[in-house]
Image: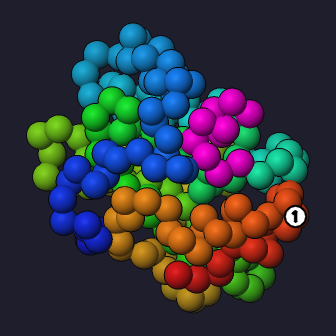
Amino acid sequence: MELIQQVPEISAYLVADEAIDHEHPLVRETAARLRADSEGAYAYAVAAYGFVRDTIAHSADSGDMRVTWRASDVLATRNGICHAKSHALAALLRAEGIPAALCYQRLAEENGDPGPVHGLIALRLPGRERWARQDARGNRPGVDAQFSLDGERLAWPIRPQFNEVDYPVLYAAPHPEVLRGMKAAADRAELWRTLPAAL
């Protein structure tokens, strides 16, 4: 899929904001720990991806009702939905100078009804001209997302028959509707009602 930069300056994808708070001490400490065991940007990106995918539970899988949206809170609670985990991964990447963007998909429920918008990231490693989308949602039976630069290995392929869509835009900050929905929800049950079904 051809990704479209919404912001022309690559530096926009390194900025800290309220959700991708990579200047927070916990984000910095986590990044430093991952970097210590990784040699080079590629190895660090793989380690950060694996850390977020495998050690931070997707709250819909774990049953955790808490809603996290700030990267540092996601790392502190080890909990979050796809958007929260994307914020955490983007923060860990940006903390080490790797440009990271937020991306979105419009997905449907198994019965074809619209579901909430799904969140993932794209990164651009040094020396590479192309962005590569990664999905750190967390694997489970039927979901096998993997880090890949050469071919996408996302949690879910798009099903056109259900009007699912890959949004090609690279967002430097969380989409306002997504962030508003996350902030407004008192718990995860309410979150499914406050998140947008389309962008």
Label 1: which residue?
189
Q: Residue at x 77, y 52 (%)?
A: 67
Magenta stretch secondary structure, dominant? helix
- Name the image quarter holding the N terminus: bottom left
Q: Which residues are magenta?
A: 68-77
Query: Which residue corresponds to the image point at 74% horizontal and 33% vertical from the top-left?
Result: 77
In the displayed structure image, the side of residue 105 where residue 66 appears, left or right: right
Q: Is residue 90 magenta?
A: no
Q: Is residue 69 magenta?
A: yes
Q: Residue at x 64, y 69 (%)?
A: 180
Image position of 197 (left or right of 1):
right
Q: How many numbered circles does the render carry? A: 1
x%, y% of residue 172?
A: 37, 59
Q: Is residue 60 visible?
A: yes
Q: Quadrant of residue 42 in the image?
A: top left
Apparent side of residue 135 relative to residue 4 in the rendered image (left or right): right
Where is residue 144 shown, x and y percent of the image?
Answer: 58, 48
User: Does 169 sit above or below residue 50?
Assistant: below
Is 150 above or below relative to 195? above
Query: Mark 1: which secondary structure?
Result: helix
Is residue 145 in sight in this rendering? no
Q: Position of residue 31 (x, y in %)?
A: 45, 24
**Is 30 above or below relative to 5?**
above
Q: Nearer the viewer, residue 144 or 29?
A: 29
| Tag 1: amino acid | Ala
- Name the colour scheme: rainbow
Return the x and y of residue 87 as percentages of the image width and height: 53, 48
Q: Residues within 10 Å of mark 1 (few under 14, many from 20)?
A: few
Residue at 80%, 64% (x, y): give it: 185
